[in-house]
Image (cartoon, rainbow, N blue to C red):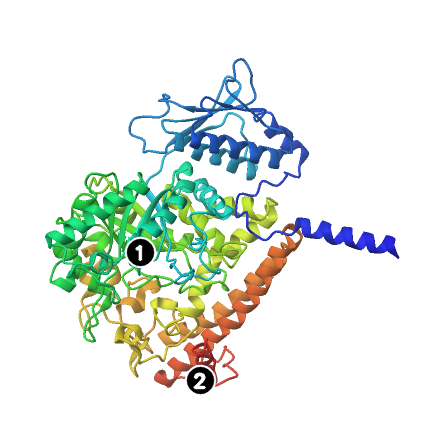
Amino acid sequence: MKKYLLILILATINHLSFADDGSRLWLKYDLIKNVQQREQFSKHTKFISVSNFKNEIISKASDELKTGIEGLLGKKASIILEAKNQTGGIILEVSNHQTLTQNLADGSFAIFAKGGNIVISSKTEVGVLYGSFELLRKIQTLQSLTNISIISSPKIKIRMLNHWDNANGTVERGYAGSSIWKWNELPFRIDPRYIAYARANASIGINATSINNVNASSRFLTAEYLEKIKAVADVLRPYGIKVFISVNFRSPRTLGGLKTSDPLDPEVHKWWNEKTKEIHQYIPDFGGYLVKANSEGEPGPQDYGRTHADGANMLAEAMKPFSGIVIWRAFVYNADPNGDRFKEGFEQFKPLDGKFDPKVIVQVKNGPIDFMPREPFHPMFGGFSNTPLAMEFQITQEYLGQSTHLTYLAPMFKECLDTDTYAKGKGSEVSKVIDGSLYNNQNSLMAGVANTGSDANWCGHPFNQANWYAFGRLAWDYTLSSEQIAKEWIGMTLTNDEKSKMQINDIMQKSLPTYISYTYPLGLHHMMGEGHHYGPEPWLSKAGRLDWTSVYYHRADSVGLGFDRTGKLSNALNLYSKQINDSWGNPDKCNLNYLLWFHHIPWNKKLSTGNTLWEELCYRYYNGVNQVKDLQEKWETVENQIDSETFQSVKGRLKIQEKEAIWWRDACVLYFKEYTKMPIPSSLTPPNRTLEDVKKITEIYHLR
């Protein structure tokens, strides 16, 4: 009996040792199973030559290579000072090698074969670190190192995660547990996850983080918290990551005891100048300020009759003696029942184009409303020639199923980045606006609202990790395809089995169109549950303000559906170029993905698909549900190649996703049916519940 009990215990331990909780993200240096492949890689990784052991960043690079090689290849990797006549190793060098031209951006690196060794070369230490992670990525994804030749340069200067983390440990729009920042423990205890966080970001080229919520508390500017932030900055610095702080514009009053926070008041100027100097005493390489002002109740310069430029330039003046910058968010809108929130940011900022200090960069969301599953690109990207604009994507899935729906976001990011604004004629893609090349701007920035939390796997849904990874890769090089990024992530995180990689990549590429199909087809938007932003609530007609309701956006009536932005209800389409107007302005030519963004379409109008609007809407909602079932079937085929814990986690969430896709379908089809007075197409099975039944589900969510 004892013998069998011992066998059972050992079997259990063995099973647990292989369970993957996702905490290592994509930096899994597990032993490569194929012996021949290990031997091939071992030929190139016999040692690591480091010219400067004392440099912190180079030390991190060599340590990462050592850890990676030992894990992946199952052999000791020695770190030596000089290669001398040895071959078959990796040489790390900081130099102006001929392959690295003067035009390449900071952090650029080259990896090449030379004299029987692989050289990772950069003009900067952080470039060597990035190159080391790139080499490990090649090994993790089983790519040959023979005659390797790579030159890689970041296209965006500042590649940043925006954390919406609060001092009390909560995370606004966080779906993976509490904040990773343990403010109650800092600065005396450094959580090991800070180092894991830094490694993960450096591996994909992220070099900046704003550490707290844009709905900021002045508390983060106190000496107590600056000491805590310093401790985090000290951990991130050796990985090439600078810290930014989101600030509350009212801080001179709440912290300094001033009677005003007017940006033109000399005492306010003085307060910010002194506070900025104080911050640099704690954090010499402080990245700068991130500001949300006069938006959704946050204080700002308009409280004193001043402009966004007045506020931003005041902070830029305080930053003049230092290298940091000011990031001013353009997410602003007025509570105007007769207006169109689509236009607010453009109209408030357009008169200020060219009036911002060179140290200011204006951060613009990818779309004009608020991180919807699919939005047309923000018109500001095509209309500002004298102000550097930063891109703000949302990695956390506020409107995309949060932590239960599998939704790979690289195609969404790419759709925006690759769209031509025609701002200077054909070839004026959004990506060229934000990288600074279109208007020769010196500063460039791409920010992603982080999806990290205290959950063991960091991001809630296992596939949400892929969105963090994809954001970093695209911020480094927006020309990468969503397919290539997915294949990298799958190989580093899930499996290198080719057949399984193809299936999983197919799941990832289809996931966003699937989600849009059962939630927001044909350009519908902003119909989610109030407050929690989870699940459908297309009937929402009362909220704190009209533009927080669903009916404000879909405009359903007995005639048709959609928000007319061609001039009858709003002239928002005129904020775009003539070429965009010609494309999106004609309902018969408009991309169906954007149709209801710009047009109020009659229910019985025939679309390019041959179906009426009502028929097409129904078919898309029903197809979305069927597509989730297809994702489930595909996932079942990879079970033998995926860690069991990860497999079961995704399998369970896909079941939830199917149930909630049906919820979305039934809610929207039954609700809009009341306006159309038309039957659901005969080829589709009508929902087996009433609209009132569905509304009761939503009422339960409001009790959360």
Q: Is residue 226 left or right of residue 461?
A: left
Q: Say few, some or many: other residues with alpha carbon within 10 Å of mark 2 (under 14 / 14 to 19 / 20 or more).
A: some
Q: Is residue 664 visible?
A: yes
Q: Which mark is residue 658?
A: none
Look at the picture and state if 61 lies above or below 221: above
Label 1 sits on a secondary structure element that is loop
Q: Is residue 150 left or right of residue 338?
A: right
Looking at the image, tell me whether mark 1 or mark 2 is earlier in sequence order. Answer: 1
Picture residue at 25% right of the left edge, 38% below the top: 323
Look at the picture and state if 95 lies above or below 465: above
Look at the picture and state if 360 lies above or below 580: above
Q: Is residue 365 left or right of residue 534?
A: left
Label 2 sits on a secondary structure element that is helix
Q: Is residue 559 left or right of residue 66?
A: left
Residue projecting furthest to the top: 85
Numbered label tally: 2
Q: Position of residue 489 (x, y in %)?
A: 51, 46
Q: Which residue is mark 2?
A: 691
Q: Which residue is mark 1?
A: 366
Q: Position of residue 614 (x, y in %)?
A: 38, 76
Quadrant where the N terminus sits is bottom right
Label 1 is placed on what type of residue? Asn
Q: Position of residue 374 (x, y in %)?
A: 36, 61
Question: Between residues 144 and 643, which one lies in front from this camera angle?
Answer: 643
Label 2 is placed on what type of residue? Leu
Residue projecting furthest to the right: 1
- Residues at circles 1 and 2 in contact by the CB criterion of under 8 Å: no
Look at the picture and state if 157 lies above or below 632: above
Q: Say few, some or many: other residues with alpha carbon within 10 Å of mark 1 (under 14 / 14 to 19 / 20 or more).
A: many
